[in-house]
Image (cartoon, grey):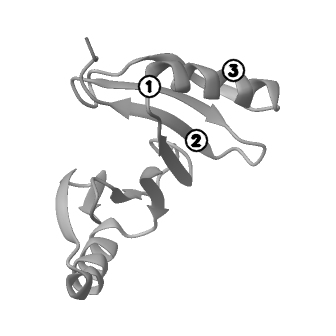
Amino acid sequence: MIDHITIEVSDLEKSKLFYEKAFAPLGYRLSFGKEGVFWAFDVGNGCLFEIQRTGEKPPLTHLHVAFRAKSKVEVDAFYRAALDAGAADNGTPGPRPRYAENHYACFVLDPDGYNIEAMINEPAKA
């Protein structure tokens, strides 16, 4: 399942206002963000649609997709399989506490240079 998608936009404030209005009939709402950097919209089932500013060095890539894994083992396996398939490393598997307390993820760049993430954000099971 897709956890979140982030796209780069040329005018962050204009896009924020656009998506707030366009998403209203669907019941999607602004969830969180950082002024001048990015905004995240809750699109249901714990999934997010995010917009980020355009800049000389974008925070991620022009497009970022994060896939939800069922375990850390799956995240690790995705990372190895993606590298074997020709992806470039963009972040080895490991905890990402700056994103969320239980966030564990890896990042690879696909053949077109897009940032692809496999992640889990759940407390460790006993």
Which residue corresponds to mark 2?
A: 116
Q: Which is more toward the observer, 41 or 15?
A: 41
User: Which residue does the image show at 52% across and 37% down from the upper left?
Assistant: 117
Provide the secondary structure element on which disc 3 rests: helix
Q: Which mark is residue 60?
A: none
Amino acid residing under circle 1? Ser
Q: Which is more toward the observer, 109 or 56?
A: 109
Task: Choose the circle earlier in sequence order: 2 or 1.
Answer: 1
* Quarter assignment of residue 100: top left
Q: Which is more toward the observer, 99 or 45?
A: 45
Q: CA distance from mark 3 to mark 2?
A: 13 Å
Q: CA distance from mark 3 to mark 1?
A: 15 Å
User: Is the Cβ of the residue at disc 3 closer than 8 Å to that at disc 2?
Assistant: no
The crowd level at tag 1 (other Cα within 10 Å; few <14, some 14-19, many 20+) is some
| Figure check: 50 above or below 106 | below
Q: Measuring from the top left, give residue 38's x and y in whole percent.
A: 31, 54
User: Which residue does the image show at 36% across and 58% down from the upper left?
Assistant: 50
Front: mark 3 or 1: 1
Q: Which mark is residue 80?
A: 3
User: Which residue does the image show at 27% across and 57% down from the upper left?
Assistant: 40
Front: mark 3 or 2: 3
- Position of 6 compared to 114: left or right? left
Which residue corresponds to mark 1?
A: 71
- Position of 28 compared to 74: left or right? left
